[in-house]
Image (cartoon, grey):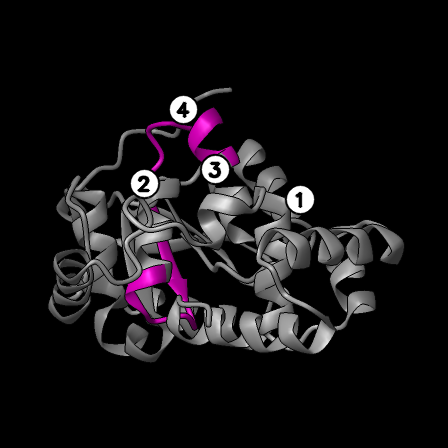
Amino acid sequence: MVDPPTPSHDSSQGRVHRILVVDDHPIVREGLSALIAREPDMIVSGEAGDPASAWTAMEIDPPDILVLDLVLPAGGGLEFLRKVRREWPLLPVLVVTMHGDAFHAERSLQAGANGFVSKADATRKLVKAIRAVLAGDLFLSGEMAKQIIAARIKGDRTLEEKESPTDILTPRELEVFEKVGLGRSSRDIAAELGVSQKTIESHKENIKAKLSLPDASALAHSAVRWVATGQTP
């Protein structure tokens, strides 16, 4: 795998930063691309709605930075991020997602992201975040950094110090658990991950056993709370 070109920061020479935007919602991709297009030294070199098309785009036309959503079909954003980090260790990655909480920010950074921005803040912070990540800096909003620090000091939602679904479940089980929390049906989850519905039901049974959840209702309740707060009952 060829590493992406070293980004140039000299717009006076007419060189621009090439950005690949990956999000499963076309209207979101259009909005992010419009924000980027305003900058004279940035260009959207490609857009993708799923991991497979994103990977193809990266191989054909390597970007300077990847702007990535966490919620993607056929594997999900975190799984794709881990793959990118293994194969493209030098490629800057900025996560831009609807999950604007410290838990998802921390998970993204642990998976290899160089920055994290909530979609709610994208209008104000996207370009600043891209520039920071391209410069080799880690980007988190001041408020997000405070949340992560506070969570670690209090011992709340700290992945390494407290047994949680991230400690107990496999990556695929955790992905299914989160999709349940987003209100996805087993059929929808199976389609998104490219597996059979029977496989998803098997994952759910394993999740219930590992988290000591008595039934499907308890699983759904626990998953919704996990997505919303990073905690389980």
Q: CA distance from mark 1 to mark 2?
A: 19 Å
Say which of 75 and 159 sits in front. Answer: 159
Per the rendering, the mark at residue 3 is: 4
Q: Secondary structure at mark 4?
A: loop
Whether the residues at callouts 2 and 3 have beta carbons within 8 Å, the answer is: no
Say which of 66 and 152 sits in front. Answer: 152
Q: CA distance from mark 1 to mark 3?
A: 14 Å
Say which of 31 and 171 sits in front. Answer: 171
Circle 1 or circle 4, nearest the eye: 1
What is the x, y in percent for residue 6?
A: 27, 30
Identify residue for label 2.
92
Circle 3 or circle 4, nearest the eye: 3
Q: CA distance from mark 2 to mark 3?
A: 13 Å
Tell me which amino acid carries mark 4.
Asp
Indicate the quadrant where residue 219 lies.
Answer: bottom right
Mark 2 or 4, nearer chain start:
4
Which residue is found at the position 34% from the left and 71% from the top? 100
Identify residue for label 1.
52
